[in-house]
Image: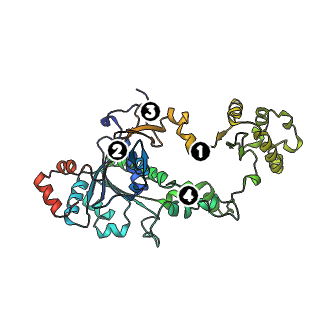
Amino acid sequence: MTDTEPIEGDQLPLAGIRVLEVASWVMAPSAGAILAAFGADVIKVEPAGSADPARAATVEVDGHTVEPGFEIANGGKRAITLDLAAAAGQEVLHRLIERADVFLTNIRSDALRRADLEPSILQARYPELIVAHATGYGPTGPDAERPAFDELGYWARGGISHTLAPEGEPPVQLVGAMGDFPSGVAIVAGITTALFRRERDGGGAIIDVSLYGAGLWTNGWELQTTLLGRAPRQAMPREARPNPLYNTYRCADGRWVQFAMFQAGRYWAPLWTALGRPDLIADPRFVDFDAILTHAEAATTLLDTAIGAVALDDLAPRLDAADLPWSPVLSLEEIRSDEQARLNGLIRSKPHRSGIQIDTVAPPFQFRGQPARLAAAPEVGQDRESLLLELGYDWDEIAVLADRGAF
């Protein structure tokens, strides 16, 4: 068996764990998708007469409609619709919770309280339940109920957009749920830690993960310096970067490379040897780390010229032969065909509910020998009858639930 071959669900590490997800968009659902990929039975609840708004963005693939963002954040789940404002919908929800190990939600605290689903209430009623609450800014404080997306809580308030912007330039804009997916991984970490503790000591837990907290953690390297009373570093344009070996350069074919040679004195000689300019190794302007930083502008200009004369495919083997820390700057189109991503199972093929196969991004961690199970995201409410039958309802009772407005 290879690391990318599918295996049976009961062999996966979270087999037997049931997760009830009452959430929309990306942050919390992406956590549910990772749990499902590793064997958990994740049941997604969407509003009756509506749907998760993440379904709205679609593309056409081989004549079939695919919801790309929804697909990555909801693969492998079962789905039901419920009207949680109706008593019958609440009845079904609580039957689902009774059988769940984890209740995962991103509903804001005030709305949870109105529905009697506030985490402390659920934990009191279901002592072994793990409640994972995803929020924008945390469960308490003056902004706890402010609406949030990752552009707001994670990126803007987390300081990342400011940290990345050179002085005098506008804040850098987030694109495409860049904060939701890493925040979802934080939720997975909290849930699995709570499951481990419950297995060892018994008892449920309430897990809080906010976009704001995840953004601060992501920005932690720079933020920590500021917390210690030092002035934060300001991002600089590439022409003014203080270390010329920690910068981006454009190759002759228009493609870019990123250097991360923080120890400029260590890498100066092997870099220029790789570039065919050993004469610059002994240049008195660049004799050591301090000298290189002092003459950073001149060094950057030299590197612009040298790298600008070489195509990436010619440059890459030279840099690798010298064991230099660098990377090509890949476009999303280039990632589609990146052998490194495919061989490591980071991009894999999976079924879509239409019957076609689609490529998808895999979870960011893997078990060697136990590849994650990447399955299709569900249609709205597609598992309603089978789930209700599992909960003990018969067909007449399901008809009554429908008459009472449960879904």
Name the front one of labels 2 and 3. Answer: 2
* First in sequence: mark 1 vs mark 4: 4
* First in sequence: mark 2 vs mark 1: 2
Kindly identify the amino acid type of the residue bearing the numbered disc 1. Ser
Q: Is residue 257 left or right of residue 133?
A: right
Rounded to the nearest angstrom, the CA distance separating label 1 from label 3 is 28 Å
Q: Secondary structure at mark 3?
A: loop
Which residue is tagged 2? 76
Rounded to the nearest angstrom, the CA distance separating label 1 from label 4 is 16 Å
CB contact under 8 Å: marks 1 and 3? no
Q: Is residue 139 placed above or below 331 in the rendered structure?
A: below
Residue sitting nearer the eye, 193 or 356 = 356
Residue 331: numbered disc: 1
* First in sequence: mark 1 vs mark 3: 1
Answer with the quarter of the image where residue 45 lies.
bottom left
Rounded to the nearest angstrom, the CA distance separating label 2 from label 3 is 20 Å
Residue at position x 42%, y 66% from top? Answer: 139
Rounded to the nearest angstrom, the CA distance separating label 4 from label 2 is 28 Å
Answer with the quarter of the image where residue 88 lies.
bottom left
Residue sitting nearer the eye, 75 or 93 = 75
Kindly identify the amino acid type of the residue bearing the numbered disc 2. Gly
Answer with the quarter of the image where residue 310 lies.
top right
Examine the rendering and report whether any part of residue 192 can be seen. no
Q: Where in the figure is residue 184, as x and y percent of width and height?
A: 44, 52
Name the front one of labels 1 and 3. Answer: 1
